[in-house]
Amino acid sequence: MRPFFNGDFDDKLLSLVILRIGGKNLMLFMIVETFKNRDAKPIYQRFLDRGRLMPEGLEYKASWIEASFNRCFQLMECDDAALLQEWVLEWRDLVDFEIVPVVESNTTKDLVTRHL
């Protein structure tokens, strides 16, 4: 698993990632899951047996599976990176994770437009 923040993000960029929703600082994350051994079956079996295994406060938004079944792209939302770490610990034996903070494109467009 790659580190959550690997030093490539400065404070200004991180502040752009934070969304103010209902008084909470929520962040969106694109989770790129690479299935170990290119095998999706054990992941789906665990999901059927035990669910998403997400801690309270971590919200699943949407996901997409690569046509080759090699990777899954999940959009998640939370206000505490430790929630993502807790969730990763439940799946890391089956999946390698890359966690990328993201901002909705309309939000970014509005931000950049103010600086033009």
Image: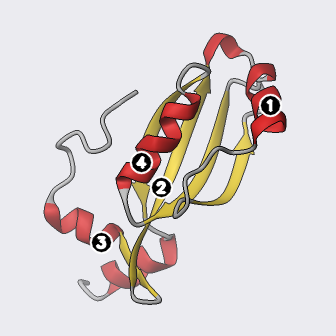
The reply to whether the C-beta atoms of the residues labelled 1 and 4 are less than 8 Å apart is no
The reply to whether the C-beta atoms of the residues labelled 1 and 2 are less than 8 Å apart is no
The reply to whether the C-beta atoms of the residues labelled 2 and 4 are less than 8 Å apart is yes
Q: Which residue is mark 3?
A: 16
Give whichever of 42, 32 is nearer the camera.
Answer: 42
> On the picture, is 55 further left or further right than 69?
left
> On the picture, is 93 further left or further right than 10?
right
Q: Earlier in the sequence, mark 2 or mark 3?
A: 3
Give above or below for 53 relative to 96.
Answer: below
The amino acid marked with disc number 4 is Val
Residues under labels 1 and 4: Cα distance? 23 Å
Q: Residue at x 49, y 71 (%)?
A: 105
Q: Earlier in the sequence, mark 2 or mark 4?
A: 2
The amino acid marked with disc number 1 is Tyr
**Image-quadrant location for residue 17:** bottom left
In this rendering, the label closer to the viewer, 1 or 4: 1
Q: Earlier in the sequence, mark 1 or mark 2?
A: 2
Q: Which residue is mark 4?
A: 100
Residues under labels 2 and 4: Cα distance? 5 Å
Name the mark on residue 106.
none
Q: Which residue is mark 2?
A: 29
- The local crowd at label 2, few if under 14, some if 14 to 19, many if 20 or more residues have their Cα within 10 Å, is many
- The local crowd at label 3, few if under 14, some if 14 to 19, many if 20 or more residues have their Cα within 10 Å, is some
- The local crowd at label 4, few if under 14, some if 14 to 19, many if 20 or more residues have their Cα within 10 Å, is some
Q: Residue at x 37, y 60 (%)?
A: 80
Name the mark on residue 44.
1
User: Measured from the top left, where is residue 93 in percent x and y?
Assistant: 56, 19
Give whichever of 108, 39 is nearer the camera.
Answer: 39
User: Measured from the top left, where is residue 96 in percent x and y?
Assistant: 51, 25
**Image-quadrant location for residue 2:** top left
Residues under labels 3 and 1: Cα distance? 34 Å
Residues under labels 2 and 3: Cα distance? 13 Å
